[in-house]
Image: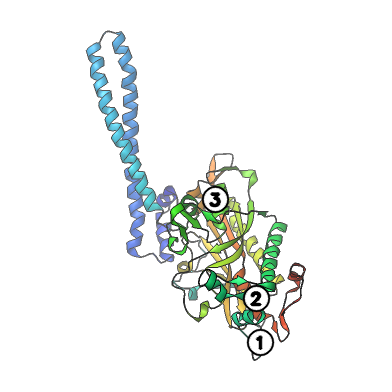
Amino acid sequence: MLEINFIRANKSRVIQGLKVKNFSEEDLKLVEGVLALDDARKEVQTNLDNLLAERNQLSKSIGSLMKEGKKDEAEAMRERVARLKEESTRLEDTLRDTKARLEEQLIKIPNIPHESVPPGATPEDNEVYKAWGEPLPELGAGALPHWELAQKYGVFDLELGVKLTGSGFPVYRGKGAKLERALISFFLDEAIAAGFEEIIPPLMVNEDTARATGQLPDKEGQMYYVERDNLYLIPTAEVPVTNIYRDVILDEGRLPIKMTGYTPCFRREAGSYGAHVRGLNRVHQFDKVEIVVLDHPDRSYETLRQMLAHVSGLLDKLELPYRILRLCGGDMSFTSALTFDFEVFSAAQKRWLEVSSVSNFETFQSNRMKLRFRDGKGTRLVHTLNGSALALARVVAALLENNQTPEGIVIPKVLRNYTGFELLN
């Protein structure tokens, strides 16, 4: 959530940023609306403060008047204090209501994009930040897509997932299950070696947690909701892990705080149909290792660069061809200031598959979470960043397709100590 003082001091920048995120002229009225509500809040607060000051002063004077024998004046003053008390109660109710309406409107305004974000409305407008510098792999005749390879070698079973749960819930079996577990362990070990603390968070979160990182009210339609308990299944480990420090004031010396966590992730993916979502291309449950960093605002973009290097290193070690995209304004999330997507090339499908998003949210999440740090002069909001390192489903798809041979699927060297086998057949 943007700070109201920031919006007031940078109104033109905020409006221009929202235009980059393709806000309509009607939507832009939100900015004027929150400023008007904040003006109303300030006026009510001033009136209330003045009234309370007058009431306190009169209350102190009543005792003096009684001592001086001025009973009538004291009684008149008591009546005045009683009326002021009624008025202050009314103003407190008005202030509470105004603050609630201000919060309700503020939460509808997305984060404004970083100056480097390109304009655009669709994924086709994203900018290639780093291209693959070598020829893309080509497979010979008879190459199979990963869903047929999975059936051939017993890697995962989508039909069994339909039987047990529903469409989009794969069941990994045998060497396929071991490959999945190997990737999770590899990603976690790499993150820990890079200084990230491992976290095992809950897989369900409450409304406050989902709201703090921006899933509510923007993405409730994409989350699975447990109505009886008012809990949400997590769409990513980012949600519980970042919220560990909600309502905390950190000492500056503790920054950066680096955390990593493996979790299953649950997404409804409503409206996703067609050949491009076959197999593991788009599922409702998938495994992911997330990296989260809380850092000083002065160095968060250097931290973002380091996170990009970390994810690049994972894909290099897996020997997967990849590219990095800088997302345009229309393809960015509600909460992000700058996002880079990693895509791996699927040789059998001859298309790029997204496997990671790495983002800097600046103070947007920390303002919702009331997450601050002391810098010697007072407190400031922390910058929050996160990234997939990595999402497994499409990584598995690319590994199966790109490494297929007549004898089976060749396992990347970096994973063989984890799998215990070199060939999946």
Q: Nearer the viewer, residue 194 or 419?
A: 419
- The front one of 7 and 333 is 333
Which of the 4 quarters of the picture holds residue 94? top left
Q: Which mark is residue 139?
A: 1
Decide if residue 411 is in sight here. Answer: yes
Give, as a three-letter code, the residue at label 3: Asn
Q: Earlier in the sequence, mark 2 or mark 3?
A: 2
Disc 1 marks which amino acid?
Answer: Leu
Is any part of residue 313 visible from this angle?
A: no
Q: Which residue carries the number 2 mark?
A: 155
Q: Nearer the viewer, residue 411 or 379?
A: 411
First along the sequence among labels 1 and 3:
1
Left or right: 102 as drawn, with respect to 197 = left
Q: What residue is drawn where x is 32% and y is 14%?
A: 63
Q: Say which of marks 2 and 3 sits in front.
A: 2
Rendered residue at 62%/69% (across/down): 392
Q: Position of residue 370 (x, y in %)?
A: 50, 46
Q: Residue 27: name its quadrant.
A: bottom left
Q: Which of labels 1 and 2 is toward the front? A: 2
- Are there few (<14), some (14-19), or many (20+) residues within 10 Å of tag 1? some
Circle 3 sits on which residue? 243
